[in-house]
Amino acid sequence: MTPFLSRVLRTGRLAALGAMTVLPALGADVSVTAELPRPEVNSGEMAELQIRVSGAQQADVPQQIAVDGLQVRLTGQSTQVQMVNFKVTSSAVYSYIIMPLRTGAFTIPGVTVTADGRQFRTAPLQFTVADARPSSVPPPAAQPPAPGYPGLQQPVRRQRPAPPRPTDLSRVAFGEINCPRRTLYAGEVVPVEIRYYFDAQYQVQVRGKLDFGAEGVVIERFGEPKESREERDGTIYNVLTFRTVLSAIKPGPIDIPEAKLESQVQIPGAVPPGFDDPVFRQLLGGNTPFSEPKDLTVKSAPLHLDILPLPKEGRPDSFTGAIGQFDIDAIVQNPKPAAGDPVNLSVKIGGKGNFKGMGAPVLTQDEGWRSYPPTDRFEGTDDSYSGVKSFEYTLIALERKSASPGAEFSYFDPVAAKYVTLSSKPLPLTAMPGATNQPVGAPEDAVKTPPAGGKSPVAASAVVKEGDPYPAITLRSWQSPVRRSEFVIASLAMLIAAVALASVLGYRHIQMHGGTARARRRRRIADLASVIRDGKGDEAAVLEAALEYAELALPDSEKRQSLVESLRSRHDEVKYGLGGSRPMDDTERRRLAAALAELSGKSSL
Amino acid sequence: MKRPLLLLALLLPMVATVPVRADFSAGLQGANDALTSGRPIEAVTRYRALTSDPALRGSGAPELWYDLGLAEEKTGDLPAASLSYRRALLLDPTFVPARKMLADVLVSLGLSAPSGRMESLTAAIHPDFLIVAGSIVGWIALLALILLAFLAPRRKYLIALCVLIMIAGHGASALGALVDPRRTAADKAVVTAKKPPVLRVTPADHGESRGTLAPGTAVSVLSRNGAWWYVSGGPGLTGWIPADTVTTLLPGSPSGGS
């Protein structure tokens, strides 16, 4: 980031911080008002509705306002921050375009606005659409495109001399405005570029936001300005370029005042003797410390626009307010849905124009389909002027279909000054109706055949036109399944079944592996006692059995320890000295058995 | 194999419905006729009588509330219509026409339509389906896991798969219970007064005002104090309002308004 842009952004952040610290104090003075600059228009003209929210940091307004016979859509927002005598006031103006669909008197209802967490409601407004008078304004001739912006040249770095005290501040900073078309149609969107030139010799701080606008004009919010450098007449300028789009609402001439940008320029002052040394300036980075700040409002030239009404002649029925140059494309997302499943048809409108004000394309050849109002999504390139708007239709086949509906979209081409209708052809697909998607007119069939999914016996066809009552009902519980006894009982039953299954399998597993460790130990002790008692095997084997018996069956004691030691000694003596293959003497075996029985607390082994 | 069948047999009554009497169907037909022939006030009376019919004890019909909403909309009672559409969506969140009509009514009232991840999820998949189907899958996976653990303990991949399916099934069931709007419906209400009621700091007519609630706004009832309810309509919109200006979302709950 260059130092100049850093300075600009830092100034903007400081301004925002200042606003954040001051504006909350104004929270108690939030006001919301609605205004109609033109309460009466002729047929074919559009009007603007402004909702002004003052004193709030955040506001939530509806995207559209429902009025029978009018189409009222939110198109943009502008914010104004003013400081007079250290008192800061802020207001956001939300602009709606009103497109009359018929003539007559209308009441625009109060709009509920949530500002800083509180709800406000505006007063209803009266709006009249009169019959159009014959237009005497000729259609506009095609305008040549505006000359291209001068190329940005990288200036040659040179040794910075001491900046002279300027005699004409208009040469230190000035603005330009570029609009490719000066004759527009009402509702047409055109890009606008505002460029501010600052002489690179002087330090400049930009203060506040760009002030640009006029009544009857909707201007999109400005994005971050782009910075560049440009040389003009031998002077190097830092250039700030703001881009936005503009649209006019009412026909007639419109004069937009100069676009103003508040800034502060450091003007070099008189240098005391002894301080005008180049070495001293070099130490200060080429800047002179003896300068004074000068507030400067940088202005562009005013902009004059001639706004023409949209012609009534040749207006197609499918025209919904789109103005610009567009193309159409359609795609079926799922050409082979399962029976009864919806088909997703995506109609994409691409090009340049007023995407925010355009309505959805009209479906054609849609007999045998049930459709719902589409959802839309806009993907702009770098602004809201050019891009692609996708309308997603959900369609349900009421009969076997092999092609999707077509789509028709009409717009007004301001360059050719005529309406253009685009259409997309039906796309091949395979769709079949589901069990509940029987066509209207066959309720008897539906009553005879209860639909799946728990429909009641009186449940008839679910195919009902929008706004018509349903002739049949489906019963559903007011309680969630998890709070119903059936679900709780079923879950408990499954839990018990799982525990029982695990128990049975676990028991079986234990049995297959010889029972529990305790049972195995008990059996082993019995086997050892049998060996000792009956004298099975040779003497060494009996002594080994006695040793193991003592380890397993006798409680730990000194007697047990001495018996074990004597047995181990005798075992080693028999096994390695006397020859362990001889049977044990009966007397000795009985004495051994008696000793073991005594230690184990039993009368015999 | 018998256990899943037993489970299905136990769960089937949850989705099965009680047959509706013939006189109920005749009453519905009469109300529909009144609505389509331009007598919305009569239609509202008839629909309201049907909504409290003993045949619907403990349950409701989303189509019936939708029809009532249409009739109320035609009489110009938009707040009541918004309540009826909300009740239809409470019973069946995937009921697209009710969602659309509710959005239209709310826009007419200057409000924004409810939106969010939970609304999107319930609009796409019915919470009942998530709960019941997820539960069935989860329990079957648990039984399979027990069988595999004891009978084929060396099949570690199958065991791991069963564990995953069990977690996914019961997770889906828990998610369905979480997003089910009926879970919190007992504490929800809708402003049905035609004039915006004033939110007050104290439950008294002369209490300090905190703003107003637009008709049709859905509020959370935090406390009840006789004829005054302490409600929240969103951040910064909490206060006392007269109980007769709101109606609970669940028809059977103790209600303030009609």
Image (spheres, grey):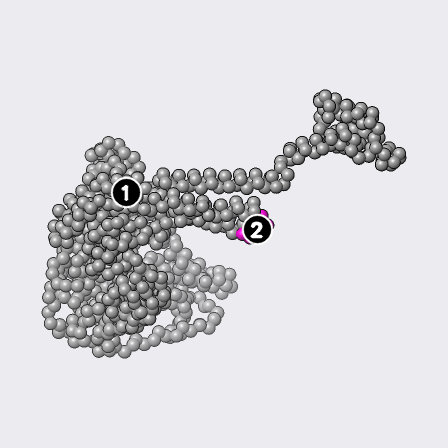
Question: Residue B57 placed where, x, y %?
Answer: 26, 40
- Residue at the image point whose x is 12% and y is 63% from the top: A103
Q: How many marks?
A: 2
- Mark seen at residue A46: none
Q: Nearer the viewer, residue A444 or A70?
A: A444
Q: Element type at marker 1?
A: strand
Q: Is residue A604 left or right of residue A587?
A: left
Residue at mark 1: chain? B
Q: Are marks 1 and 2 in contact (CB under 8 Å)?
A: no
Same chain for the residues at labels 1 and 2, yes or no?
A: yes
Q: Is residue A245 above or below residue B234?
A: below
**Which residue has dot 2 on it?**
B156
Chain letter of the residue beneath label 2 in the structure image: B
Q: Looking at the picture, which amino acid does disc 2 mark?
A: Lys
- Residue displayed at 57% across by 51% down: B155
Q: Nearer the viewer, residue A233 or A571?
A: A571
Q: Which of A197 and A504 lies nearest the eye of the viewer?
A: A504
Rendered location of residue A359, percent (x, y): 25, 64
